[in-house]
Structure formats: structure tokens, C-alpha cells
Image (cartoon, grey):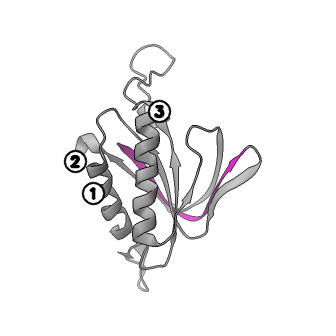
Amino acid sequence: MKIIIQRVKEASVVVEGRTTGSINQGLLVLLGVGNEDTKEMVDKYVDKLVKLRIFADSEGKTNLSVQDVQGEILVVSQFTLYADCKKGNRPSFIGAGSPQLGNEIYEYFCQKVKEKMGTVQVGEFGADMKVSLINDGPFTIVWDSRDW
């Protein structure tokens, strides 16, 4: 699993002219699913995600989580996080999970975020999405399950 976490002032995703998800202050999460990913991994990632202290407290220190600031989370599937550009000029996506696995893990991830946060905004799996955001900081974190 590869995850890009961006602390945002606002973010939204549009599919074919309709907004499928939109948030104000919170986290934009780009989620890539690999061949070896499991629901157990999702449980660990989501638990850490909602507790990740990357929002400023009253003294300007990053001591608060998205839950602490009553922020929102927007999750967007992005298999292109598995792009392998080692050979040639066209990326290979052989490391990305199958569409079936990707959708299953994506839906499970969104469900787990909803359980922890009460709500979650989402993109549309497999769709051509237009993602807009105002990155807050900028503050961006990259997680790769191979590093955990």
C-alpha cells in the first residue's frame, strides 16, 4: 500500500462534472493498493492516520490530529502511485493490485475511516477524477507498506 497524506485547507474531487467529495480543513489521502495488501494493513494505517499529529496547536506546534481539530478526510484511489519508471519512458504498473483487489481495499479503507471519523468523503474508484486542493503548509507525508 502506498499512501500520500496532504494536510489541506480544502480539497475536492470531481468526476464527469459532478463533485463526489469535498472537504474543508483536514486530510487528502491518495491511496494506492499493491498486490500484497490486506485488510489487516488497512486497520493499522487508518488507526495511525486519524491519530497522526500534524495540525498546529495554539503554540504553533504540530501536536493535534485530524480528530482533535474536527477536520475531515477525503480519500481518493490512485493506482498510479505504483508507477515503475526504471525502464523506458512509459511507466509500468505491474506492482499495482488488480482492479478487484484495489476496489475491495479502497472501499474497506473508506469504511474504516468512516468508523473512526463518523464521515468520509471519497473519489470514485477507477474513474477519471479531477482533484483540487489547497495544501496547508505545504505538509505532505508518504507512507509505503514496504517500509513498515
The image shows residue 97, relative to residue 134, as above or below, that is above
The reply to whether the C-beta atoms of the residues labelled 3 and 2 are less than 8 Å apart is: no
Instruction: Please provide percent x and percent y for residue 134.
Output: 61, 60
Instruction: Please provide percent x and percent y for residue 82.
Output: 41, 32
Q: Which residue lies at the image location 65% right of the left edge and 38% below the top edge?
A: 128
Q: Which residue is mark 1?
A: 44
| Residue 104, image quadrant | top left
Graded by Cα atoms within 10 Å as few (under 14), some (14 to 19) or many (20 or more), the crowding at tag 3 reads few
The image shows residue 108, relative to residue 55, as above or below, that is above
Mark nearer the N terminus (3 vs 2): 3
Mark nearer the N terminus (3 vs 1): 1
Q: Which residue is mark 3?
A: 99
Residue type, numbered disc 3:
Pro
Label 3 sits on a secondary structure element that is: helix
Region of the chain picked out in magenta, as a range: 1-15
Residue type, numbered disc 2:
Trp
